[in-house]
Amino acid sequence: MKRIIAVIREEMFDNVKNALLEAGCEGMNVSSVKGRGRQPRMRESYRGSKVCIDLIPKTRVELIVNDEDLDRIIDVILENARTGEIGDGKIFVSDVEEVIRIRTGERGSDAV
């Protein structure tokens, strides 16, 4: 099993969520985060003062998938989160040793 963490633009979340649901990936955890990558800091004027915005709001989507579904789910995220502009986000993949469904005690792929 694999854990996918996708940090994406907030405005792309609904597209990604709906595409994941259509792809049969129903379980996910979602949170609002702030961060930055390589993009330059944004400078804006607020009430006459210059303000440097260096942490940009993003949405973090976390999924656990079976190994055989990994590439397909990554492709779904890429297709629906990409704008082609700086700041589209990143996808991180890591191994998951065990998953246990608390309600039933199911383990492994049955718990995903």
Image (spheres, rainbow, N blue to C red):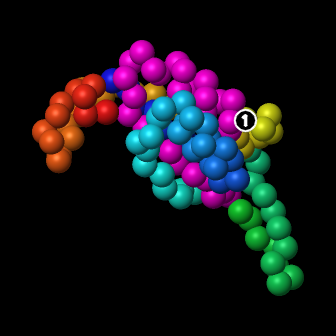
Q: Quadrant of the N terminus?
A: top left
Task: Give left or right: position of 48 versus 6.
Answer: right
Q: Which residue is mark 1?
A: 82
Query: Total of numbered circles in the picture?
Result: 1
Image x and y of residue 73, in percent? 53, 27
Q: Is residue 57 above or below residue 78?
A: below
Task: Give left or right: position of 107 versus 31.
Answer: left
- Residue 38 visible in the current orientation: no
Task: Give left or right: position of 25 versus 35.
Answer: left
Between 42 and 112, the residue placed more toward the observer is 112
Residue at image location 17% in from the left, 47% down from the top: 103
Q: Is residue 90 above or below residue 43?
A: above
Q: Quadrant of the C terminus?
A: top left
Between 89 and 22, the residue placed more toward the observer is 22
Segment colored magenta: 54-81
* Residue 66: quarter of image: top left
Identify residue type, mark 1: Arg
Residue at image location 56% in from the left, 26% down from the top: 74
Q: Is residue 65 magenta?
A: yes
* Residue 42: quarter of image: bottom right
Image x and y of residue 100, in percent? 19, 37
In the current view of this chain or complex, which residue is farthest to the bottom?
Answer: 47
* Residue 22: quarter of image: top right
Q: Is residue 72 above or below residue 56?
A: above
Task: Give left or right: position of 111 versus 43.
Answer: left
Between 96 and 53, the residue placed more toward the observer is 96
